[in-house]
Image (tube, rainbow, N blue to C red):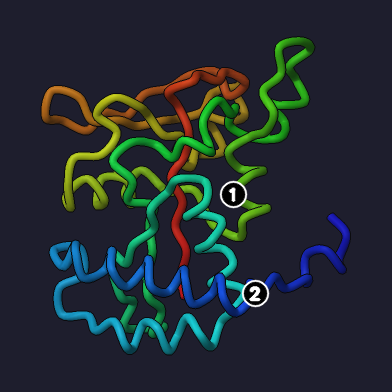
Amino acid sequence: MNKNKMNQQHTLPSDRQEELLNILKKRFEKNMNRHKGLNWSDIQKKLEANPDKLWSLDEMEITGGEPDVVGHDKKTGEYIFYDCSPESPKGRRSVCYDNEALESRKEHKPKNSALGMAAAMGIELLTEEEYRNLQKLGDFDTKTSSWVITPADVRELGGALFCDRRYGQVFLYHNGAESYYGARGFRGSLRV
């Protein structure tokens, strides 16, 4: 990847920053069970000091992720946001797992890959552990599924992992990394 592109910082226009901060604040206040003991004003200060992270949160928002704070890393001081939409974000479905899988498809290619989109948005896919932690905060992906970070040994064999919630349980499954479905997307995380 071009070094200039990697170091390029994205910023939102000030009116969109204000609008997004209001959306995030309302969601934060509506879902206090996700972030007990955390204070919105501290989070907002951190967001305002990191406009590139605010841009990434906007990308999460406009693709249907409904990002919300799910934790605070006391060691680094970072606040942790996950996509908290009830189902896998609509604007991130019908994607294969990674760019290698995307390139391997000879026909009927999806428009993008989960890892490619996440990188462009400045976010990370959830790990299986993060996905299971999210599911402790509510019932997510009861009709959809979400790609999760796949261990290298599984990926080297052509597979990729995804999760969902069915029958009151969280399930981890496998599929070919090049597969894609209208009901499978991905959830992201962002540290600010």
Q: Earlier in the sequence, mark 2 or mark 1?
A: 2
Q: Which mark identifies residue 59?
A: none
Q: Report the disc number at residue 13.
A: 2
Q: Secondary structure at mark 2?
A: loop
Q: CA distance from mark 2 to mark 1?
A: 22 Å
Question: What secondary structure is found at the residue carrying circle 1?
Answer: helix
Circle 1: is it few (<14), some (14-19), or many (20+) Cα within 10 Å? many
Q: Residue furthest front?
A: 15
Q: Position of residue 78 (x, y in %)?
A: 41, 79
Where is mark 1, residue-wise?
118
Q: Residue at x 86, y 66 (%)?
A: 3
Q: Amino acid at mark 2?
A: Pro
Q: Nearer the viewer, residue 10 or 167?
A: 10
144 displayed left or right of 101? left
- Judged left or right of residue 12, residue 18 is left
Locate residue 170, reporting x and y percent: 22, 33
